[in-house]
Amino acid sequence: EAEVAQSPRYKITEKSQAVAFWCDPISGHATLYWYRQILGQGPELLVQFQDESVVDDSQLPKDRFSAERLKGVDSTLKIQPAELGDSAMYLCASSLGLAGNQETQYFGPGTRLLVL
Amino acid sequence: GQNIDQPTEMTATEGAIVQINCTYQTSGFNGLFWYQQHAGEAPTFLSYNVLDGLEEKGRFSSFLSRSKGYSYLLLKELQMKDSASYLCAAMDSNYQLIWGAGTKLIIKP
């Protein structure tokens, strides 16, 4: 069964350091999403890609967060510098990406980030 | 504004039935999703409703009333492994998911 891959699964860093997360969506999925989930809350969309283009990054804190999907396949989310409040689960999801479609999003295992 | 409401926590007994409610307000509507999320893991897809009525899938069923902005997830013959958070998410007119905070379901023997 095809799955969304993410790495690392866990990351501990000190504040002001840089961190990067990687995601490989299900093969053939054009749409890729990065979410942040704080314990006890629902996922919050950070950025959405359609192929290599950003569709929505309105909730991405652009002063410290960046995301790219250069070849329209895998993606990297970076935080620089990390702050204590960035401690959360970072989830990557993908969907087929057919325009105007109500599509199911499939999630990877997530990266749990702890900033000390 | 857009909003999803669901109870924070529910408790049920192994073998019983539980209903988790969700109400939503969105700009446009393109369907309602339910996901299951075990502690420390990623959400996994359970169901999708876009038309009024009940969709049954094994022990899990999901209901939608578009006129009332209301959905529920029904879990039958509860098992200990059903202890998890259940996330309700509505898709708006831009095909974006609006997520609830999740309902933590505790199953007792």
Image (cartoon, helix red, strand yellow):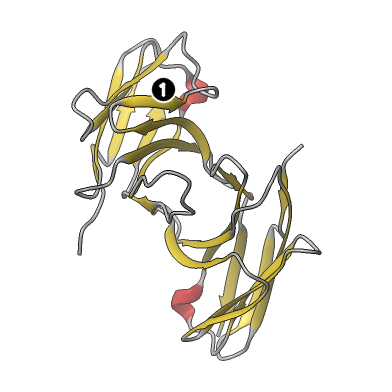
Above or below, B89 relative to B66: above
Residue B86, visible in the rendered structure: no
Residue B13, quarter of the rendered image: bottom right
Q: Quadrant of residue A58?
A: top right
Q: Is residue A115 left or right of residue B32?
A: left
Which one is in front, B48 or A83? Answer: B48
Q: Position of residue B72 (x, y in %)?
A: 67, 71
- Whole-percent x, y for residue B47 in the image: 50, 68
Horizontal and vertical percent position of residue A26 = 24, 50
Against B82, residue B66 (above or below) is above
Q: Residue at x 43, y 56 (%)?
A: A104
Q: Nearer the viewer, residue A91 or B33?
A: B33
Q: Chain of mark 1?
A: A
User: Does residue B13 sit above or below A95 in this rendering?
Assistant: below
For this view, does A78 lie left or right of residue A56?
left
Secondary structure beneath dot 1 equals: loop
Q: Looking at the figure, which quarter contains the N terminus of chain A? A: bottom left
Residue at image x 67%, y 62%?
Answer: B9
Comparing B88 with A30, the one in front is: A30
Query: Would residue B19 be seen by someone viewing this image from the given angle?
Result: yes
Of all residues shown, which one is farthest toward the right? B68
Picture layout, residue A16 above or below residue B82: above
Amino acid, disc 1: Leu
The residue singled out by tag 1 in the image is: A116
Taking B34 as reference, is A26 left or right?
A: left
Q: Quadrant of the C terminus of chain A?
A: top left
Residue A52, image x and y in percent? 28, 27
